[in-house]
Amino acid sequence: MNSDLLFYVVSARKWSNLTRGGLFKPEELLEENKITLLAAETVNDYLNNKFSGRKNLFLLIIDITSMEKRPKKQGDVFVVENAIPVDAILDKIRLDSNKEGKFDIQIDQN
């Protein structure tokens, strides 16, 4: 597993409004003064708990080595207290839940 990669889930509809001035600033940062990032092994549980039945989401792949301040581990998640440089976002993958409203994302970091 590559621990330099973390993940974030965002509505595809909101994506362009959250990336201004070269920084990714999700609503969570404005509301809670933090951004919660996920390790690969927690993505499915997170999606199924928070986004069951949802469609048109983006899974952001974030290279934390490109960030000035590294996220800190808090339980099963990683937290960063500042905006993420758009350059640190390696890719965004569109996600839709299956017919049962569930997600089954396979992330291979080898």
Image (spheres, helix red, strand yellow):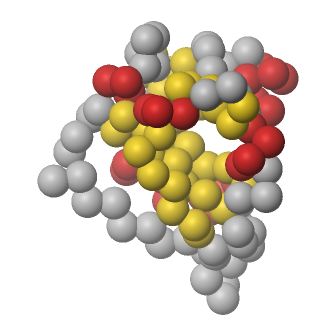
- The quarter holding residue 68 reads top left
Farthest-out residue, front: 21
- The quarter holding residue 59 reads bottom right
> Vertical placement of 38 versus 102: above or below?
above
Horizontal and vertical percent position of residue 55 = 72, 72
If the image is split into quadrants, where does the N terminus sit? top left
Which residue lies at the image location 45% right of the left edge and 11% below the top edge?
Answer: 69
Which residue lies at the image location 37% right of the left edge and 34% below the top edge?
Answer: 63
Does residue 46 show up? Answer: no
Does residue 8 show up? Answer: yes
Give the camera-side residue of 98 and 95. 95
| Drawn side of residue 24 relative to residue 33, left or right | left
> Vertical placement of 24 versus 107: above or below?
above
Which residue lies at the image location 68% right of the left edge and 25% below the top edge?
Answer: 21
Horizontal and vertical percent position of residue 34 = 67, 20
Horizontal and vertical percent position of residue 82 = 62, 15
Farthest-out residue, bottom: 99
Farthest-out residue, right: 31
Which residue lies at the image location 34% right of the left edge and 60% below the top edge?
Answer: 107
Give the camera-side residue of 31 and 84. 84
